[in-house]
Amino acid sequence: MNLSTIKLDEGNMRLKPSHRKQLMAWLKRSLRLGERLGEFVLTIKLHRDGRQVDTRGAVHVHGVDFNCHSRKTDWQSALRELVQQICHKLHQVHIERTRVLVRA
């Protein structure tokens, strides 16, 4: 049984429930890839600094750790870019794991 965890630290920002739901919809693919790899833990931190929204994501998945970062003027663009980066890196990890299994 693979357990996946997503932690959201809103920092000095507050997201409405509808915005959280939108974020979870964006994270569906990342969550599915993380569950395939196992031991998936994603921590997202939001922070508004003036007009900029700083988003950081820390991912741990079955022995692999990586960080992603995005900074934009609105929270939707910043989070969307962060989610795309996370999904891309998870896909790369999945491909590497598949290559290793095929070679063995």
Image (cartoon, rainbow, N blue to C red):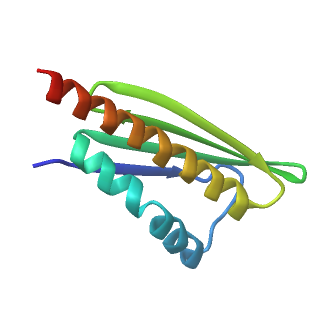
Q: Is residue 13 above or below residue 66?
A: below
Side of 18 relative to 77 (left or right):
left
Residue visible at 46% across and 66% down? 24
Residue visible at 62% across and 58% down? 80
- The residue nearer to you, when weighing 44 against 102, is 102
Question: Residue furthest toward the bottom?
Answer: 18
Q: In the figure, residue 59 lies in which quadrant?
A: top left
Measuring from the top left, give residue 104's x and y in whole percent.
11, 20
Side of 80 relative to 96 (left or right):
right
Q: Is residue 93 above or below residue 11?
A: above
Measuring from the top left, give residue 20's x and y in whole percent.
53, 69
Question: How many discs appear?
Answer: 0
Question: Residue furthest toward the front?
Answer: 103
Measuring from the top left, give residue 18's x and y in whole percent.
56, 79
Q: In the figure, residue 97 lies in which quadrant?
A: top left
Question: Residue furthest toward the top?
Answer: 104
Q: Is residue 13 above or below residue 17?
A: above
Residue visible at 40% across and 53% down? 30
Side of 16 relative to 63 (left or right):
right
- The residue nearer to you, when weighing 4 against 47, is 4
